[in-house]
Amino acid sequence: MTEKVITRFAPSPTGFLHIGNARTALFNWALAKSLGGDMLLRIEDTDRERSTDEAIAAIISGMEWLGLDYAGEPVYQSKNIKRHTEVANLLLAEGKAYKCYATPQELTQMREKAKAESRPMVYDRRWRDRPEGDAPANTPFVVRIKAPTSGEIVVHDKVQGDVRFRAENLDDFVILRSDGTPTYLLAVVVDDHDMGVTHIMRGDDHLVNSARQITIFNAMGWDIPVMAHTPLIHGPDGAKLSKRHGALGVEDYRRMGYLPETIRNYFARLGWAHGDDEIFSSEQFIEWFSFSGLNKGASRIDFAKLENMNGHYIKNCDDARLFDLMVSLADELDDQIASVGLKSHADTVIAALPALKTRAKTIVELVNSAQFIYQARPLQFEDKAKAAVEGDSLQILRDVQPVLASVNDWTHDGIDQALRTFAEQKDLKFGKVAQPIRAAVTAKNASPGCFDVLLLLGREESLSRLSETTAV
Ligand code: GLU
């Protein structure tokens, strides 16, 4: 029987859920699902000072919003500290690790020497082979692993191929600090082993860590999981994605009005490809996922493309769901007017969505575009809409008002007939009549067409708005 595939997403809860980390989660999720396995979530909260409950909540809610499910409950790394320490002591007892009493001054000297020789600081292993009897009494020590001193450590990476590190550059790194706490390098290996992780996929900024962690796996005689390191996401200018490029947190994308399916599709595609496919469902992503589709180089985020893709998913989204998303976003952004307005005009807004959603690139835009439905009178005109109801147009509106008022059959055909007759009588192009009406009842520069808005607003509200606009 082949072993069940277990992947894991292991974020450190020191801020928000970074979009790059979310993509790592997405890849791990697809990998596990594509191989009939499970993804686990491990919160790496051993840095108690930097880890916050808000950050943990942001990770969990971000995963939920993205629809990235994991098996079981999240594992909190801080709860496993005893076990990490136990493994360090085991390595110590087996002579695979040792106590190092080098003082801070000695380490500083080593660092300065390395700097003067323009090479990276490598601990010189001065305590590696010293007898126990040399240990100074009552002196703090760290525990270091006995790493290979010659040859190479090879990371068999599923994306980059074999990545080789010269043993002398990796040194005997610390696995237990002088206060007895385990280091990140040790904790990750122990947890990965204990959680039965078969595949580790993470950003390529972890490649050197992987080489070091392999040393621990080997020292313990544990199987080394399959490893894959994905290139990072860069900004449009090719520099590592940072605040100055725009949104970094998954939550920010939600608040900007992106749909989770857009984020899944766009960020999966950014860094992975299946032929020329740009738009694909999560089911297809899972079905098609393989290491060979992963890019070897960093990919640049293209915000315009992301927005267009969101427009595509909004257009294809069910209206009732869109409406719920609009309300929850208005609530989240604390836009009370929009929240109350949407809820009190739910039927009209939902009826308007087929027309509104063809224009919107984000849920925020959609909320704004529905504002004409519930806005209170007197209407607040946008500048361009104001220009559209002034001058000649104002006269046309005044003339057409009694014509519309006489329409009892408030349907597309009923309104159409009355307006066409009016336009013919006045020798006006139809648009010269329809455009000012549309602007007069919406106060917006952009909105669905004249018939759509008159029908959505209904006879009474349309006529009231028109008479108010023409009364100025
Ligand atoms: N906690 C690490 C991070 O957030 C990831 C560790 C890992 O994936 O091994 O960068």
Image (cartoon, grey):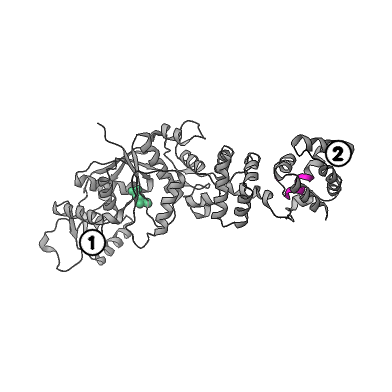
97 or 472: which is nearer to us? 472
- Residue marked by disc 2: 422
Q: Earlier in the sequence, mark 2 or mark 1?
A: 1
Q: Is residue 207 left or right of residue 409?
A: left
Figure check: 105 above or below 365: below
Is residue 419 left or right of 314 when viewed as pictured?
Answer: right
List x then y, in percent, for residue 70.
Answer: 37, 44
Q: State the image coordinates of residue 102 (x, y, percent, origin top left).
A: 21, 63
Q: Residue 444 in magenta?
A: yes
| Quadrant housing the C terminus | bottom right
In the displayed structure, would residue 250 be above or below residue 351? below
Question: Which disc is residue 180 wearing?
Answer: 1
Magenta residues? 436-447
CB under 8 Å between callouts 2 and 1? no
Amino acid on which the number 2 mark rests in the picture? Phe
Residue drawn at x 77%, y 50% as measured from the top left: 464
